Image (spheres, rainbow, N blue to C red):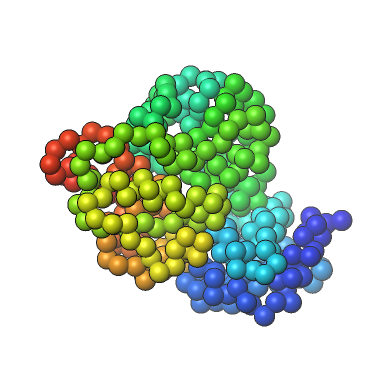
Amino acid sequence: MSALEVHRKAILNCSFCPKLCRFACPVAEAEARETVTPWGLMVLVDDVRRGRRPVDSDAAEAWAHCTGCGRCTQVCKHDNPVFEVLKTARSLAVAAGVAPQAPQAWSLAPLAVAPGEPGGPVQVLVGRAAPEVIADTLAVLEAAGHHPLGPPALPLPPGWRRGAEVGAPLALPAGAFEGAHTLITLDAADAAALKQHPAARRAKVLHWVQAVEGRLPEPTAPVLSGDALYLDSCRLGRGLGVYDAPRRLLAALLGGQVREAIMHREEGGCCGAEAGYAALDHSGPGRVAQDAVADAPDLPVVIADPTCAAHLAPHTGRRVYPLARLLARALVARAPHPEKHLEEPVP
């Protein structure tokens, strides 16, 4: 049985569907191409499964146009796991040596853990966030009682999770988190993957938002004086089901109210940063980012995942703040107008 035959039911469900989820796909909407709709990608997978076409560079390039945001599955009457099927298809492209190089290079960049000491009870997977965002998040975690924490250290083998998203094998060794009872990630996609990885099976896996909610001191003054737009990260929302916690954390930091995009929570879009899509030499990732805030009021944007924050900022022209940055400023801000401490929104 071929690797794709395992997904036969899901592939056929999509292939015979009249593109009912097309409207939900941020990539299809941004690129305006039928080839990159969930239906188009799955028909291409079905052609390979049936032997109608080979796994070639054209097929591999098309499969790379998916962020894994899960909107198609969320609106599908059959809950079809499109991204899981595409990961299998991408693995065939990697094995055939025809996968696009940019996503492969993205997937192989090393991630890192910031533990108090190797094998300590609390370990933090910092991923690829900018150093300033990592420092802010570690400060927030320590204020919430997750300590001792040190500077980022202990690099992990390349491609342990993101490699899987573009079709490369997992590389995390079985003893990577030996002795840890809590694993905290900065990126929601890391948390989702760790929950399924044998190396983390004995540990409690939390996104940093889950790890700090209800454990931080009340801010003494607003960090932002007016309203702010909270933008759902698809991996934190649809991926982990975390919607309310970041909104509560943000509400405590504002002089105004938490505002929403028209499409939010379960219906929220995608920033365009994940699964190697943003690494493609193509205008699509920028348009996906722009679409994510197109229907939203012109307010400062706050998002809990640093990967999305870093991608949104240069493409949208908005002020974009990682939530951890605002929380870190609240811990030290005691002046009447603490906004002056924010400096640049995203490094």
Residue 336, located in which quarter of the rendered image? top left
Count of picture labels: 0
Residue at horizontal 81%, vertical 68%? 51
Q: Quadrant of the C terminus?
A: top left
Question: Residue 119: percent from the left, percent from the top?
Answer: 55, 20
Question: Residue 45: percent from the left, percent from the top?
Answer: 72, 66
Query: Which of 309 and 88 lies nearest the eye of the viewer?
Result: 309
Above/below status of 304 relative to 79? above
Does residue 135 show up?
no
Q: Left of 90 or right of it: where is 297?
A: left
Question: Residue 121: percent from the left, percent from the top?
Answer: 53, 22
Residue at horizontal 67%, vertical 63%? 79
Q: Left of 161 or right of it: where is 2?
A: right
Q: Left of 129 or right of it: where is 236?
A: right
Query: Which of 146 and 130 lies nearest the eye of the viewer?
Result: 146
Residue at horizontal 74%, vertical 77%? 16
Residue at horizontal 54%, vertical 56%? 238
Residue at the outermost right position = 1
Above/below status of 187 relative to 40? above
Does residue 334 show up?
yes
Query: Which of 200 and 315 lies nearest the eye of the viewer?
Result: 200
Q: Quadrant of the N terminus?
A: bottom right
Q: Left of 148 or right of it: where is 85?
A: right
Residue 177, located in which quarter of the rendered image? top right
Residue at the outermost left position = 336
Question: Residue 35: percent from the left, percent from the top?
Answer: 61, 74
